[in-house]
């Protein structure tokens, strides 16, 4: 059986293929959405009106996204409108917004790196590669999310988003949330300068939302020259350019301009995770390898405010991580190390600039389900530590070839006992 497919066609055709892969998970998310809607007594009229406004907004910035969404709906045999609803829920739909994601930008002499640990509700995650206009786009996100949480393109350009500080300066209207903004900026930009130009376009069109009700957004981007940290509300943004060294971000604004927008102090959870990652990186004196970063993503110091999170105390947990390394001298050798699933129960896999085939278990959510099965059984124990390190050591020495992906699936099955 061929375990690889390409997403290199028209947007509707790509969506059709993805929808077929995602049918079961989309049905579950839509069913859950409807249950919450009923429990909160939110009328169909409210949901439909928001979806209609959201569709009009997407039509202004990317008709291609609408074509893709129609394909996803047809492929999964679910309602097109329901997928739109998932991406523009009323601001109080979920009780709280997760304190999610810990990231860093590191600008070195030879390589520039972007790293993000994603913490969110335990929805099934996927990793996919889309090829169009001579470029390859690598996306990591939860199935049902039209936006992305991890982004890497063959420009090369790397991107990530974190929830930002609490602020009153985020609209409740259907707009682009942080995941959709990241996708838009990534797909339409080749450099950091283009990222900022495209962000200005979104602000000019009043299309910028936040990461949730009364939460701003933080975006991190790296190209082969430098990095930038962007802190946003719906009304304005602040930019920190990074030309050397490391900048670490969790879930609170750090630039003076953006700190002035906060409506409440940063949470202890956000401050603790940022401090811990700073401590771990300081021990390396700015010189760290990919294996060091993998270890950072599995760190459990300060539970429940740890870098690797479970959902026993709070409703969010670590669901993925990516380390994106851009080679400054030879960009074609840049690599994206992708960990789909809780980092204690998954493994990192390498994807280069030329990667254009989707490994179906990563695309359809079944790889994530293997990791989640282990998580539910063993929580965040360190039972896989030595085996993970051994597997990833071999991977680092041989980053090419498709057999590694099949071995990763076999490895997860062997460990889930």
Image (spheres, rainbow, N blue to C red):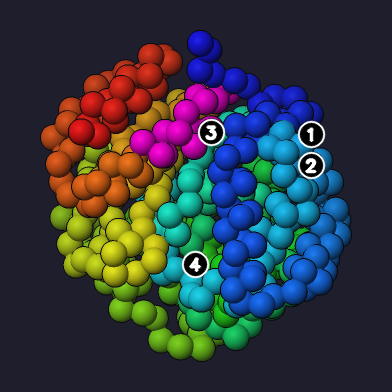
Q: Residues within 10 Å of mark 1 (few under 14, many from 20)?
A: many
Residue depth check, mark 3 versus mark 4: number of the one nearer the observer: 3
Taking the magenta stretch, the answer to whether it contains residue 369 is yes
Residue 12 tag number: 1
Q: Earlier in the sequence, mark 1 or mark 3?
A: 1
Q: Which residues are magenta?
A: 356-370
Q: Distance from label 3 to label 2 (Cα)?
A: 18 Å
Q: How far, Cα to Cα, is label 1 from label 3?
A: 17 Å
Label whose residue precedes the other's in the sequence (1 or 4)? 1
Q: Nearer the viewer, mark 1 or mark 3?
A: 3
Mark 3 vs 4, N-terminal side? 4
Q: Main secondary structure of the magenta part?
A: helix
| Labelled disc at residue 70 | 2
State which tag comes first along the sequence, 3 or 2.
2
Which SS class for mark 4? strand
Q: Secondary structure at mark 1?
A: helix
In the image, 218 versus 4, the foreground residue is 4
Mark 1 and mark 2 residues within 8 Å of each other at the beta carbon: yes
Q: Up-down: is 314 above or below 361?
A: below
Q: CA distance from mark 3 to mark 4?
A: 26 Å
The picture places residue 345, in percent across and down from the top left corner, at 28, 41
Residues marked 1 and 3 touching at CB (< 8 Å) = no
What's the CA distance linking mark 1 and mark 4? 30 Å
**Label 4 Cα crowd, 10 Å radius (few <14 / some 14-19 / many 20+):** many
- The quarter of the picture where the C terminus appears is top left
Residue at mark 4:
163
Distance from label 2 to label 4 (Cα)? 28 Å
Residue holding disc 3: 364
């Amino acid at each position: 059986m061929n375990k690889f497919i390409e997403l290199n066609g028209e947007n509707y055709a790509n969506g059709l293929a993805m929808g077929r892969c995602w049918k079961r998970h989309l049905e579950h998310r839509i069913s859950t959405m409807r249950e919450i809607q009923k429990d909160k007594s939110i009328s169909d009229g409210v949901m439909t009106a928001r979806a209609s406004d959201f569709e009009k907004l997407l039509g202004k910035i990317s008709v291609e996204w609408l074509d893709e969404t129609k394909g996803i709906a047809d492929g999964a045999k679910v309602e097109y409108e329901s997928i739109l609803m998932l991406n523009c829920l009323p601001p109080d739909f979920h009780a709280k917004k997760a304190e999610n994601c810990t990231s860093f930008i590191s600008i070195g002499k030879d390589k520039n790196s972007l790293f993000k640990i994603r913490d969110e509700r335990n929805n099934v995650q996927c990793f996919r590669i889309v090829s169009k206009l001579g470029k390859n786009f690598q996306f990591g996100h939860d199935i049902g999310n039209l936006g992305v949480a991890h982004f890497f393109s063959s420009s090369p350009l790397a991107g990530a988003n974190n929830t930002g500080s609490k602020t009153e300066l985020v609209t409740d209207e259907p707009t682009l949330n942080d995941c959709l903004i990241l996708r838009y900026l990534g797909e339409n930009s080749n450099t950091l300068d283009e990222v900022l130009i495209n962000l200005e376009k979104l602000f000019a069109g009043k299309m910028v939302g936040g990461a949730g009700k009364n939460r701003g957004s933080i975006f991190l981007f790296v190209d082969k020259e430098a990095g930038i940290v962007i802190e946003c509300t719906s009304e304005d943004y602040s930019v920190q350019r990074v030309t050397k060294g490391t900048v670490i971000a969790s879930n609170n604004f750090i630039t003076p301009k953006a700190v002035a927008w906060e409506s409440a102090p940063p949470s202890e959870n956000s401050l603790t995770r940022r401090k811990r990652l700073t401590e771990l990186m300081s021990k390396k004196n700015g010189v760290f390898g990919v294996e060091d970063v993998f270890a950072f993503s599995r760190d459990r110091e300060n539970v429940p405010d740890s870098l690797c999170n479970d959902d026993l105390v709070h409703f969010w947990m670590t669901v993925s991580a990516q380390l994106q390394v851009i080679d400054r001298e030879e960009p074609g050798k840049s690599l994206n190390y992708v960990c789909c699933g809780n980092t204690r129960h998954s493994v990192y896999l390498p994807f280069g600039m030329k990667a254009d085939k989707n490994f179906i278990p990563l695309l359809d959510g079944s790889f994530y389900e293997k990791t989640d099965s282990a998580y539910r059984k063993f929580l965040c124990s360190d039972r896989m530590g030595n085996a993970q390190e051994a597997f990833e050591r071999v991977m680092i020495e041989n980053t090419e070839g498709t057999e590694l992906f099949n071995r990763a699936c076999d490895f997860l099955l062997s460990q889930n006992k």
